[in-house]
Amino acid sequence: MKDWTTLEPDRVRLLSRHFTPGRGGQKIKHVTIHHMGGVGGLDFCWETWQTREASAHYTVSPTGEIGQAVWDRDTAWANRNLDSNQKTIAIEHSNSGGPEQDWPIGEKTLEEGAHLVAAICKYYKLGRPVSGQNVRFHSIESGGFTECPYHLRPGHKYHDGYIRRAQYWYDQMTSAAIPTKKASAPVSDLTKKYFTDFITGYLGPQFDAIQEIWRQLRGPAGTGWEQLGKNDKGQNLTLVDAVAAIRHDLARIEKKLEER
């Protein structure tokens, strides 16, 4: 994580599908824990969610890298439960092995994931992490539709240690912030992260749209479109070239008609 205080992730790769902009007027109330059912990080999840109608806000890789695929202000399709989705921040944890090893999770992933839970609880004023309250689990939120997050669920081998580490990090982060003087005025919700997220979230799709227009005009890699024909140099025509050629031919036809 680049900044635990502002929730600035190590890397951002936003989805353009399979999430819902905004939170339907709901406020963030809790964090939901997932495991990936695979070994990977942000790119692994991003590729998977291109064809699967699912998503999460954050991913934690085997190396502990924290990625963001959906902005906090938007609703990830994480829990198979609209109300839960609108109120939660969803975190995907990489496994370190597959089903033949019974889906283990590495220490680095567990530690950084727990730290992220603590940071989210602090940032959104959710209170100290408590299992079943402000820290929830995919299997429970989905009504038993899935076993995810498997060993991170209550009663399974990673659960208790993970929650203890989340509480440890929360205590570390909040104890340093205990005021020694008269409390200052409340901090505005218009934080640096809010403006960064807004600018990136607004401009990102605009840049994508501009790039698509540019591609349509010039063709793949700027090499023109084969279906539009070729110029006298044997190069594919771009859309602009093709329009210019049509205009030239029309002018020539008009001139011939006038000469008759």
Image: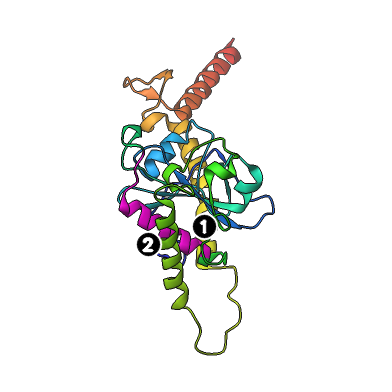
Residue 35 placement: quadrant = top left
Q: Position of residue 240 (x, y in %)?
A: 47, 30
Figure disc tally: 2
Q: Position of residue 80 (x, y in %)?
A: 59, 39
Q: Position of residue 223 (x, y in %)?
A: 36, 29
* Nearer to me, 254 or 90: 90
Which residue is label 2 attached to?
2
Q: Nearer the viewer, mark 2 or mark 1?
A: 2
> Magenta region: which residues?
103-121
Q: Earlier in the sequence, mark 2 or mark 1?
A: 2
Residue 41 placement: quadrant = top left
Which residue is label 1 attached to?
197
**Furthest residue in direction right, as rendered:** 25
**Furthest residue in direction bottom, as rendered:** 181
* Nearer to me, 52 or 171: 171
Q: Is residue 47 above or below residue 189?
A: above
224 sits left or right of 101 in the view:
right
Dominant secondary structure of the residues highlighted in magenta in the image: helix
Q: Amino acid at mark 2?
A: Lys
Badge 2: how crowded within 10 Å, few (<14), some, or many (20+)?
few
Q: Amino acid at mark 1?
A: Asp
Query: CA separation, marks 2 and 1?
Result: 15 Å
Query: Residue at left 59%, top 9%?
Result: 260
Q: Position of residue 102 (x, y in %)?
A: 35, 37
Q: Residue 106 colored magenta?
A: yes
* Nearer to me, 252 or 69: 69
